[in-house]
Amino acid sequence: MESTASNESALSFPRRFWRYQSERFPLVQHSPLVAAFSACAVIFPTLLADAVLPGWEAFAGAFIVCLWFFFQLRIADEFKDNEEDTQFRPYRPVPRGLIKLRELGILFVIGALIQAAVAWYLAPALLIILAIAWAYLALMSVEFFAGDWLKARPITYLWTHMLIMPLVDLFATACYWLPAGSHPGLPLVAFLAASFANGLVIEVGRKCRQPDDEEDGVPTYSKLWGRDRSVTVWLGCQIATGAFAILAALAAGTVWLVAAVLGAAFAYSLVQRRRFINGHHGKCIETASGIWTLALYLALGPLSWLLVR
């Protein structure tokens, strides 16, 4: 381990960063999801307004800001969890010396400058929404100044941290409606609620493990609730997401499409739940979460525009 860490630390920063992202924030996996997420957020309010799509700048801006924001969430976790990672997960990139927290901090700041520049270019008022999301991220990074209290209450910890999802989505939607002077109204609330519930799907899904895969010092929902119950909660989060998505689709006139796409994705999740309960690796649940997420945002956004408009 020490020899490997020494060899890695001697690599150039671009090579070290490439290894880091492949382990902790794989762009090949995240980019398509963020692209669907941001494109949906831009398209959905145009469906509500029965308007034409905005220019490419809105789509590119939403994607750039969202991708950086999710990467910043990962960086914030590296700082917040460094002590525990060093003790329980020394194989991770920061504890083993592949990349330094200072380097990640610099990347965080660079990302913030890029986000601010993009927001200013699209509409200076977007900086207000961006600042709100940054402020919430800052509070998350210090566990809302109540770390021990939150960790003793895992469900509260879960939902308070997942509130960041609708804030990021709010910014992405505003890349259209704020420059256009449009007002999405109550249907946007249902859309943001679906985003929040889907954050729960992702978070619970990535922490469902088989008993032999559990690690000391690593909190998971399968450890908290048991394997079978945790994956049932995961399905429940999908049902909640689907319900909010249907409410949002009602206003956009795309209920049948959203229901059909999410119905197919939910059927796939049911199959993966059975595989997981029968002993298959927890990766199948995490993968199903990604497929569900992709289905959600494609159905509410690009597919609705292409097939219903």
Image (cartoon, grey):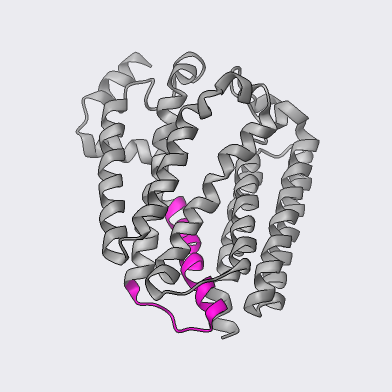
The reply, left or right, for residue 42 in relation to residue 17 is right
Viewer-closest of 241 and 272: 241
Residue 228 % position (x, y):
80, 37
Q: Quadrant of the C terminus?
A: bottom right
Q: Is residue 34 magenta-colored?
A: yes
Viewer-closest of 48 and 40: 48
Q: Is residue 182 magenta-colored?
A: no
Q: Quadrant of the N terminus?
A: top left
Residue 35 % position (x, y):
44, 61
Q: How many dots with numbers?
A: 0
Secondary structure that dominates the magenta span: helix
* Residue lying at 64% horizontally and 45% vertically, measured from the top left: 200
Above or below — where is 22 with respect to 144?
below
Q: Which residues are magenta?
A: 30-56
* Residue lying at 47% horizontally and 40% vertically, measured from the top left: 136
The answer to whether one can see residue 284 in this image is: no
